Amino acid sequence: MPYVRGHQAVVHEIHGVRFTAHANPGTGSRQIAAWQGEVPAGTVGVPHTVSHEEVIHVLSGAMRFTIDGESADLGAGDTVIVPAGSLFGLDNLGADTATTWVTTSVGLTATLPDGSTLTPPWAN
């Protein structure tokens, strides 16, 4: 199915963040996963180690991204490339919800601080 209508996207929520899955194996994509993230104001993200490279484009708002201890504040129009195997976190320190568009390879997993592994359904 090469066309995914907005009403077909599946919404997931975890750690206070909303993930709207547009492309993944469930919608017919075999290699690439893509989703929109909505990060509410004041959200302090859970640091996690990613198994695959992620490309995150900020659509609106402003957030602080931290990769392996190095932080940068990014806003609408900015992009961050998160290398596979890096410890990654994001925080929305602003007053408004921030939105992102994220792409990665299908099969992404995230290792959380307690050692558990999350297999996000929006990327698998």
Image (cartoon, rainbow, N blue to C red):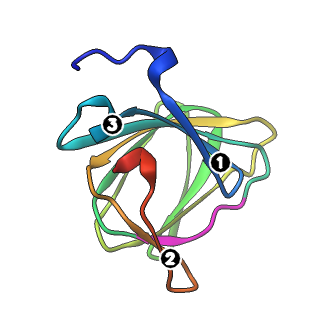
Residue located beneath label 1 in the image: 17
How many marks do you count on the picture?
3
The numbered mark at residue 54 is none
User: Dot 1, how many residues are within 10 Å of its Cα: few (below 14), some (14-19), or many (20+)?
Assistant: some
Q: Which residue is mark 3?
A: 26
Range of magenta residues? 44-49
Q: Secondary structure at mark 3?
A: helix
| Label 3 environment density (alpha carbons within 10 Å; few <14, some 14–19, many ≥20) | some
The answer, for residue 103, to whether it is visible in the render is yes
Name which of mark 1 and mark 3 comes first in the sequence: 1
Residue 98 on the magenta segment:
no
Q: Is residue 46 left or right of residue 81?
A: right
Reading the chain from its start, which is encountered first: label 2 or label 3?
3
- What is the CA distance from the residue labelled 2 to the residue labelled 1? 22 Å
How dense is the environment of label 2, judged by Cα within 10 Å: few (below 14), some, or many (20 and up)?
few
Amino acid bearing label 2: Gly
**Closer to the camera: disc 2 or disc 3?**
3
Quadrant in the picture for the N terminus: top left
Q: Assign the magenta stretch its main secondary structure.
A: loop
Mark 1 or mark 3: which is in front? 3
Identify which residue is drawn at 43% across, 36% down: 35
User: Are the two marked residues, 2 and 1, in contact with CB atoms closer than 8 angstroms?
Assistant: no
Give the x, y percent position of residue 96. Answer: 77, 35
The residue carrying mark 2 is 69
Mark 2 vs mark 1, foreground winner is 1
Q: Amino acid at mark 1?
A: Val
Give the quarter of the image for residue 37.
Answer: top right
**Where is residue 119, by image quadrant?**
bottom left
Extreme-bottom residue of the structure:
115
Are the residues flagged by discs 1 and 3 in contact, CB closer than 8 Å? no
